Amino acid sequence: MTDTLGSMRRSHHCNELSIADEGAEVVLMGWAQRRRDHGGVIFIDLRDRQGITQVVFNPERDARVHEKAHAIRNEYVLAVRGVVEKRPGGMENPALVTGAIEVMVSELKILNRAETPPFMIEDDIEVNENTRLQHRHIDLRRSSLQRNIMMRSRAAAAARRYLDEQGFLDIETPCLTRSTPEGARDFLVPSRLAPGSFYALPQSPQLFKQLLMISGFEKYYQIVRCFRDEDLRADRQPEFTQIDMEMSFVGEQDVMAVSEGLIVEIFKAVLDLEVKAPFDRMTYQEAMDRYGLDRPDTRFGLELCDISDIVADSGFKVFSDAVGKGGIVKALNAKGCAERFTRKEIDDFTDFVAVYRAKGLAWIRVKEDEWQSPITKFFSEEEKKKMAERLDMQPGDLVFFGADKSSIVNEALGHLRIELAKKLGLIDDSIYRFVWITDFPMLEYDETEKRYQALHHPFTSPAEEDMDKLEKDPLSVRSRAYDLVLNGIEIGGGSIRIHQKELQIKVLEALGMSREEYEEKFGFLISALESGAPPHGGIAFGFDRLMAILCGSSSIREVIAFPKTQKGACLMTAAPGPAYRAQLEELGLKAGPVK
């Protein structure tokens, strides 16, 4: 039998006691982290969410309690009463906040027993992630994960506190809504009351927060759950969390200023770190030109350089043909790396960029008196001279080249830049470098579907000076969108929205939607825009991604209490699972393969 609490009530957490408490009688409660028996004296490291305190059972102090302590095993739940004592000289543990003291136990209650856990409750254990996720309730006892979840709670509290002070209203939006398939797939929920009809779980509260602006609430926020049925990886989950905001009567700078204040508050609350605002700004075009990606990591150099004009007529057909077909040639100079990488490693880089559709990776080692590469013989002395000047090619450098469509070259070299920085140790993880990316293209052309798609979403307003290009030259239209990038990771994205019916219809038509289609999908929004919609804009921060950065984790699964695997499964609850036949019949559904 296990004990009940009785008259025992916890007086302190397991990280609170110090020499100043010597002689005090205390009551602690928690889990037995580990048990040690030294010459008859039993030592237990007692753990709760705050930390660890060593408690001692000495037969010379209390033989009855000592005898009871023999039953304790790892992860037993305990309540102890005892007196705080200074540890004997040389027995202190500087790794613990409470390492100078121990509690000599006079009363013990075993509140619950535990089976041997599937792995040790320690941070430095090597254990398969699936095993951890299957036993997540035990995995969450580890101090590193508890730290992450507590940091997440502090960040959410800081966000709410800041936004409340800024006059925002916390307003909930529906989780059961209408499917408007744009971008990622929706999760569908069958309706029992309307057989054959389905709700969708929201990919974001986008339309509802715009409707709240039309309703006159002016400032909305929500720390909200969102759902996307998409292929997963380390920074994606089928259900995820956003800090969502929307404001009326604002422009881009207003949204950015509020967002920067929010980030400053979160970093102060979670890391006690002073972040300097305002953050840097960079246009989308500049980001692509210099870094190849629209989410640049600006903590290090290795910038890309366009040499298309120099090699447009060169004898190296790979380069000249790429330029002749409207593509580009870019280079990346890895300064001082001519002897840093072997030919095998360079071949590995070629395989690396192939993942991003690059057909190859040309390179040149710069020596004192020559360039070493299979491609150097194809360039004239004048072309070599111009390349050397533009790329600052010095003896000891290793230069990589990409040639293809601009989208392929930028993506391949942009990721190669990051891979090189990792291998060269150029990334300082103690630095937090923010940059706003602005002036995104409004639309992009989807080669598969043969139509235009919104780069952000179809409710983003075009730049005012580009409005007249929407029909004649849609790909040249810039949007009023903005992303906040931190250390090469997009942590937030937003825009100034379309608030006029005529412009909204024009944009939807540019996306290839017929009147019947946009009326069916977005008729309620278009109707709302007719009722006097104010200018408005907002932003949504990926809370999971932000917390992964703050916690120093490479995966958002480490900052979510109960995450899914990369296959979208919860190994602890065995979800998703089959429904009962009666449930399916009630919904008018059949289980089986979809034809």
Image (cartoon, rainbow, N blue to C red):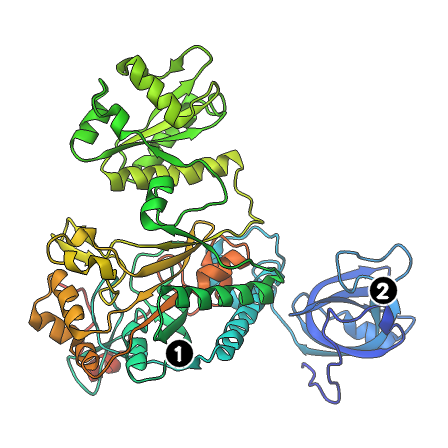
Image position, residue 365 (x, y; %): 41, 19
Q: Mark 2: give few (<14), some (14-19) or many (20+) Cα within 10 Å.
A: some
Give the image location of residue 349, x and y in percent.
38, 31
Q: Position of residue 74 (x, y in %)?
A: 67, 65
The amino acid type of the residue labelled 2 equals Val
Relative to residue 402, is residue 63 drawn left or right? right
Tell me the quarter of the image containing the N terminus: bottom right
- Identify the residue position indicated by label 2 in the image: 41
Question: Alpha-carbon distance for marks 2 and 1?
Answer: 62 Å
Residue at 58% from the left image edge and 68% from the top image edge: 150
Label 1's element? strand
**Circle 1: residue type:** Lys
Which numbered disc, 2 or 1, marks the residue that appears first in the sequence? Answer: 2
Q: How many marks?
A: 2
Tell me which corner region of the image, top left, top right, bottom left or bottom right, holds residue 380: top left
Residue 314, image quadrant: top left
Depth check: 381 or 430 in front?
381
- Residue 227's x, y, as percent? 33, 68
Q: Is residue 62 left or right of residue 498?
A: right
Is the residue marked by circle 1 packed among few (<14), some (14-19), or many (20+) residues within 10 Å? many
Q: Which residue is drawn at 56% across and 50% down?
A: 126
Work out whether residue 70 or residue 294 is closer to the camera in this orientation and state it.
Answer: 294
Observer-nearest residue: 544 or 498?
Answer: 498
Q: In which quarter of the image is the C terminus?
A: bottom left
- Which residue matches tag 1? 219
Which element is circle 2 on? strand
In the picture shown, does residue 215 fall above or below 346? below
Position of 351 relative to 93 (above/below): above
Using the rendered image of the protein, determine whether residue 89 is visible from the camera's viewpoint: yes
